[in-house]
Structure formats: structure tokens, C-alpha cells
Image: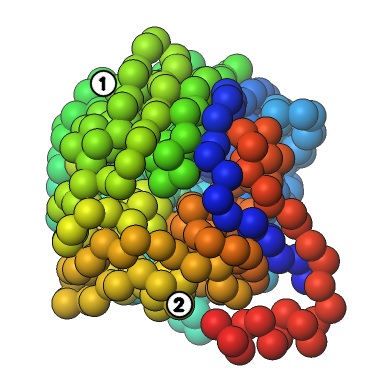
Amino acid sequence: METLLIQGGAKLSGRVVVSGAKNAALPAIAAALLTGGTVNLSGVPSLDDIVTMCELLESVGVTVNRGPGCLSLNARGASAREASYSLVRRMRASFLIAGPMLARFGIARMPMPGGCAIGSRPIDLHLKAFSAMGAELSVESGYIEATAPKGLKSAHIYLDYPSVGATENAMMAAALVKGSTVLENAAREPEIVDLANLLTKMGAKVVGAGTGVIRIQGTDELEGANHVVIPDRIEAGTYMTAAAITKGDVILENVVPEHLTAVIAKLRELGAAVEAEESEIRVSSEGKPKAVDIKTMPYPGFPTDLQAQFMALLSLADGMSIITETVFENRFMHVDELTRMGAKIRIDGRAAVIEGVDDLSGAPVNATDLRAGAALVVAGLAANGDTEIVNIGHIDRGYEHIERKLNSLGANVVRRSVPKERKASAATAS
Ligand code: UD1
């Protein structure tokens, strides 16, 4: 079992290259199921979640060739096989193969998805979209079966909430259905636009991605395509908070500043200097951050995936900040761990009230989920003394070469193998 040991106190400085977006790569990989042609993806980060998605596709007959930062996927030999529970339970995004499977084979049989333990994460909106397109649904023994023996039909779909995954699943299914499907109250995230671009290259016509209304003109046969995945705005935002909390000066390369508008605004509000150019962002900071209030929202609002990292930063702010989490229930599991490092945070329903302290102190802590783990890394970089994070498998799901990238900016982060007993005692202590 591995841990990350962080010796806090170094000011980060230098340049770091942001990887391709995990959350854009995952649906792009799933989209390969829609065609017998070859989908070539580049800018694919080397992450555990990407490995899981590739294994899932292989398990239904897709040929996957892996190269550094790229994938070549061919689903000519894919068939209507049941998705394996052991793979799906590892990652909620596995459910993204349901739309393509249903559209291509007329049946998708999926275990209920797993993933980060951040509150109830239903899939009712995905299912409503499939059902609006004519699928019949049944749930049995933990499996969901969607069938459309005569094929799906184009539809007018209203999503009760702009769910990212439901929007992606519906878009992919609609791309392989003749006629025009309209998605209303669709998610507007940059990853949706990236998927629309890929589906367009594959032969569908997608209009309105990035707005609340997306129109997909599908076709009964899609082609292979070559596609470069967009940069990871959440990884970028994590390094931006790391620069700010260490009072450092960091330039991020391979970013799209427009994808980070809310994040840049909050960093400026709390006193950091942020300069944005075409594909670079520089973040520098001196002194204590000012307290600010944040409310997470669907894009273009402040991303829930950066809530925990900003909480780490605000735990050292001058004054009291309030962070309200509106996207997920129960996404405050990092609070107990940050508190163990000396932060003063109180939870009141969906809000966390953070009273800034002068110092954080290093401690053994537990990464309870992906972004909670990232927040502990950010906190550990600024803490006095050593922070050892256990359960870093969660962090590896979403951050490529995290210790290598941080150390190139001057941090002291070591990945250690520890015997199980030691891991157990650290976890108990946390
Ligand atoms: C995606 C991202 C995740 C991010 C989230 C919100 C991927 C692989 N993951 O997750 O990192 O945190 O967007 O920006 O892209 N909901 C329902 N019913 C549904 C679907 C969702 O009630 O059928 C609820 C969820 O429980 C949650 C909210 O909608 O409270 C947002 O979820 P959603 O946008 O679907 O997130 P994901 O696509 O799972």
C-alpha cells in the first residue's frame, strides 16, 4: 500500500503542464462503442479511471491499443455483453457506456454504478432520457436493463437537472439515432462541448453544446475519428490553489482560461494575482488569503470538483468564509481530515463555515475520495511539518504524476510503500 508523504512549507514556483481532462477522456472512450471505425484519442491522461474504462470496453469486445498519452479504440468486434460488476463498481463513469451500448445493440445491461462516496448519486436522469427515446427499463438483482429491440427513436428530452453524465449518455445515444433529438436543460460543461466535437467528427450533427439546449441530428452509422482531449480544468484549478496556498508563483501550461472563469474570479477575490493568456495561466500570491464565500454550481458556476481544494486554501484565510455545496450531498468528508490538521471548520447543512487560522500542522490523514484527497495534498503543502496521506488510490484516479509535477515546482512529496499494519495504524489515527 502506498502513501504520499508531504513535507510542507515550500513555495511552489515554476511551470507545470496540465494533462488532458479525465472527465472528457472517459466519455470519448465510451463513444468509441458507437462505431465499427477506429477512434484515435490523444491528450489522454495516464490515470486509474482511464484504465478502468478501457478494461470495461475490452470486456465487451473493443480492441484497445495504448500508447503514451493516446488510445486507439476499435469496437468492430464489440457485442451486447453485460458490463462486469467488478469494473463498474470501481467507477461511476462506467455508466457512460450504457447510452452507446443501447444505441448500437438495442440492449444495455449494467450493474448499478459505484464511484466516489460523495452522497447519493442516482442515475434516474440517464434512465429517463433512455426511456424518452423509447427504451424499456427493468431493474433486477442490482442490474439495470435497458432494451430497444426495434431501435431507439429521436426525442425531445427535458433533464430535471443539468447532469453531466446524463447529458453525455443521451448525446451519445442520440448520435446513433436517425432524426433530431433535443436535450433541454442540458449540462453546459466544457467536457460536453468536447464530446459534441468528437460526435460531430464521427458523423453526427450537434448544435448548441455549451448551452442549455443541445440538438443532435443522428445517423444510423457513425465513423471513426481522431480527437485531442481538452485540458483538465480541475487539475489546473488544483495546482492554482496549490500555488496560492504556498504563496508561490506558478505558470500552468496547456489550459483553456475560459474554462476556469469562476475559479480565476475567486482566486482574484481572495487576493491572488492571476494572469491568463491564450493557453497559460500564472498564479502568484503573497500574504494571507482574504476570506471569500463560494457556492458550487453546474458550469459555468464554481465547480464542485474544486470545492475541497478551495476549502484547504480558505482554512488559512484572514476571516470567516462560507462554502455552500449545492451539487452533491455529503461532499464534506475532507472537513474532518482538514480539522485534524488544525483547520477550524463547522458544517451547517449544505454549508461549511471556515474560520481562518494562522497555521496548519502536518498530520496522518485519509483521502476519502478523489477531490478530498487533492485538498489534503494542497493543505499538506502549506502545513508545518509532515503530512502523510493514506488511501491515495483515490488521488491516482484523477491526478497524473502528482508527486512528479509538484516536486518539479519545488515541493517535497514522496510516494512511499508502507506495510499494511502501518497503513492500518495511520488510517485509524485519522
Ligand atoms: C460529473 C463528473 C464529476 C463532477 C460532476 C459534477 C465525470 C466523469 N464526472 O459527474 O467529476 O463532480 O460531473 O460536475 O465527468 N444526479 C441525479 N440523477 C442522475 C444523475 C445525477 O440526481 O441521473 C445528481 C447527482 O446525484 C448529483 C448531481 O445530479 O447530485 C450532479 O451529477 P452529475 O452532473 O450527473 O455528475 P456526474 O456526471 O456523475
**Is residue 362 in view?**
yes
Q: Amino acid at mark 1?
A: Val
Camera-near label (1 vs 2) is 2
User: Which residue: 47% across, 28% down?
Assistant: 249
Up-down: is 230 above or below 162?
Answer: above
Q: Is residue 321 left or right of residue 74?
A: left
Q: Which residue is mark 2?
A: 340
Residue 86 percent coordinates (x, y): 67, 70
- Choose between 168 and 220: the one closer to the eye: 168
> Does dot 1 land on a helix, a strand or a loop?
strand
- 330 in relation to 171, above or below: below
Question: Would you call the spot at circle 2 few (<14 residues within 10 Å), some (14-19), or many (20 or more)?
Answer: some
The tally of labels here is: 2
Q: Amino acid at mark 2?
A: Arg
- Which labelled disc corresponds to residue 207? 1
Among the two numbered marks 1 and 2 on one chain, the one whose residue lies closer to the N terminus:
1
Q: Position of residue 27 (x, y in %)?
A: 49, 40
As helix, strand or loop, the secondary structure at mark 2 comes to: helix
Q: Identify the residue at image location x=45%, y=77%.
A: 340
Q: Nearer the viewer, residue 200 or 45?
A: 45
Residue furthest to the top in view is 278
Q: Is residue 160 above or below residue 171?
A: below
Residue 25 at x, y percent in the picture? 54, 36
Looking at the rendered image, the quarter that the C terminus falls into is bottom right
The residue drawn where x is 68% and y is 60% is 4
Mark 1: C-beta under 8 Å from nearest atom of ligand 1: no
Q: Place residue 391 in its image quadrant.
A: bottom right
Q: Is residue 157 left or right of residue 252?
A: left
Local packing at callout 1 (Cα closer than 10 Å; few below 14, some 14-19, many 20+) is some
